[in-house]
Image (cartoon, helix red, strand yellow):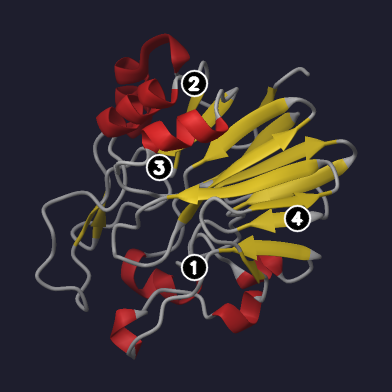
Amino acid sequence: MLIRRLGWAGIEIEAGGQRLVVDPPVGFGDLEQFVGPPLTELPPASGPADVALVTHLHRDHADPDALHDVPLVLRPEANDGAFLEIAATTAQEPIGGTVVAPWETVDSGAFTITAVPAVDGFGDPQVSWVVEADGRRILHCGDTIFHGSWWRIRMRHGPFDAVFLPVNGALCQFPHRAPGSPFPADLDPEQAAVAAEILDAPVAVPIHYDTIHHPPIYAQVDDPAGRFAAAAGGRARVMEIGEELELAG
């Protein structure tokens, strides 16, 4: 299994002659009016994907431009509600896809894919994804906050060879969600390190940092990757955008 970091929350996995992407980014669309353009390059996958997984329908994780040619798109259910309730989400129509519920498993070619519980910082439906191929197993956690399902995920689907965890601990002051919360909308570095320990992952890769920082609307913590590496110790593996991680079978 060969894994390449695409930037923001995106990763690309190659196994068995096939390619799978998770939360592949190209741009932020209408979300840019709040948070500005991406601060770092968001490279596309290195080739056409056979499968795409979407952790949730926020525009920075569910990019229609990155998903429209993918034969199989798996995603959680869409949220409903008035316009301001679902602002910054991608409508389900542009990306289509198949809804997968937590703990549901889908087989597709070289990949066995399972949705597991996650909790979104704004209350929208979200899942994390377990991906198995070539005798290896990884977990991608989108931009979840800390929750109580880590132990069950490990017991049901561990051991993991690597986990990918958000670390930027974003504090958000969106005008349509006022008053703002003093608590982060996704894992901060120390919370992510605790999750990695609970999951008992030998390799823990920080994702979801250094691409959006637009205070006071959206402010990440200082040095998210460095703080995660310090807190997670020997299991931490900081990957540059475009860097590859090979998990030998």
Residue shown at 49%/68% (left/top)? 57
Q: Is residue 128 above or below residue 163?
A: below
**Disc 3: which residue:** 209
Find the distance from the CA under tag 3 to the CA under tag 1. 18 Å
State the residue lying farthest toward the bottom.
82
Q: Is residue 121 left or right of residue 157?
A: left
Asked if marks 4 and 2 touch (Cβ < 8 Å), the reply is: no
Mark closest to the chain's N terminus, 3 or 4: 4
Mark closest to the chain's N terminus, 4 or 2: 4
**Disc 4: which residue:** 51
The secondary structure type at the circle numbered 3 is loop
Asked if marks 3 and 4 touch (Cβ < 8 Å), the reply is: no
Along the viewing direction, whichever of 196 and 90 lies nearer the viewer: 196
Report which quarter residue 17 is drawn in: top right
Find the distance from the CA under tag 4 to the CA under tag 1. 17 Å
* Residue 34 screen position, x and y as percent: 32, 70
Q: Amino acid at mark 2?
A: Ala
**Disc 1: which residue:** 57
**Disc 2: which residue:** 201
Mark closest to the chain's N terminus, 1 or 2: 1
Find the distance from the CA under tag 4 to the CA under tag 2. 24 Å
Report which quarter residue 244 is drawn in: top right
Q: Amino acid at mark 1?
A: Leu
Task: Name the mark nearer the viewer: 3 or 1.
Answer: 1
* Residue 36 screen position, x and y as percent: 38, 65
Mark closest to the chain's N terminus, 3 or 1: 1
Asked if marks 1 and 2 touch (Cβ < 8 Å), the reply is: no
Mark closest to the chain's N terminus, 2 or 3: 2
